[in-house]
Image (cartoon, coloured by chain):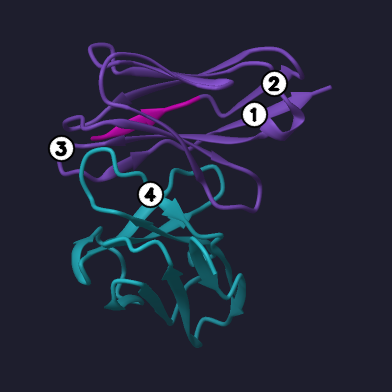
Chain colours: A cyan, B purple
Amino acid sequence: ETGVTQTPRHLVMGMTNKKSLKCEQHLGHNAMYWYKQSAKKPLELMFVYSLEERVENNSVPSRFSPECPNSSHLFLHLHTLQPEDSALYLCASSQGQGESYEQYFGPGTRLTVT
Amino acid sequence: GQNIDQPTEMTATEGAIVQINCTYQTSGFNGLFWYQQHAGEAPTFLSYNVLDGLEEKGRFSSFLSRSKGYSYLLLKELQMKDSASYLCAVRDSNYQLIWGAGTKLIIKP
């Protein structure tokens, strides 16, 4: 595997379910990110981890819970979601957080909450 | 507040040139990025500008004017595969990326 991978690619869940999204990066990067992408809206940064420590939580509801067990893996645990949470969830990684470091994105998980 | 503005959609003809504009108002500036995103796929990095001027990479060029809070992405010799959304993002004073909503580019034969 190369680059950034995400599983599952598609997920349909009810509002009372608990599920987890997984992201893995094979690039040796130190920073990882979760984004939410809704149609015709800017990417919304949800969480940032740098060297496995969370450095940013942009007022995300507690029904989203991130976990970063090591620098290569990132999870997003989902619990009691709402229909408006349906979106594409993108994981990204970068060599660092500063300056010119571009972010490399995974293919995303298309989440539908019913 | 912080804001990135891009046109929602543009249409161009195969073989032609198109310019996608991006204006920004952010708290601080530490670089501007352009990404390409094909439908159903991940965004991929195209260019980075931190100093004023034009950066050229093959058929794609990106321009920045920090004093005007303005950038554009120039695509030459358009190909059908260039049909995609183009995302502008600015790194602010906290080194976080602020994203535009993207410009959907439609290429017609």
Does mark 4 fall on the same chain as mark 3? no
Residue type for callout 1: Leu
Q: Earlier in the sequence, mark 2 or mark 1?
A: 2
SS at circle 2: loop
**Residue position marked by numbered label 1 in the rendering:** B105
Question: Do the CB atoms of the residues marked 1 and 3 lie less than 8 Å apart?
Answer: no
**Residue at image coords 48%, 44%:** A41
Q: CA distance from mark 2 to mark 1?
A: 11 Å
Residue A78, position as x, y percentages in the image: 42, 79
Q: Chain for mark 2?
A: B
Q: CA distance from mark 2 to mark 4?
A: 25 Å
| Above or below for A21 versus A18 | above
**Residue position marked by numbered label 3 in the rendering:** B93
Q: Chain for mark 1?
A: B
**Residue at image coords 66%, 47%:** B39
Residue type for callout 2: Leu
Q: What's the mark number on residue A27?
A: none
Does mark 4 fall on the same chain as mark 2? no
Within 10 Å of the Cα at label 3, are there few (<14), some (14-19), or many (20+) other Cα atoms? few
**Residue position marked by numbered label 4 in the rendering:** A103
**Residue position marked by numbered label 2 in the rendering:** B78
Residue A38, position as x, y percentages in the image: 52, 52
- Which of B20/B82 is in front? B82
| Above or below for A18 versus B80 | below
SS at circle 3: loop
Q: Quadrant of the C terminus of chain A?
A: bottom right
Within 10 Å of the Cα at label 4, are there few (<14), some (14-19), or many (20+) other Cα atoms? many
Comparing labels 1 and 4, the label whose residue is closer to the camera: 4
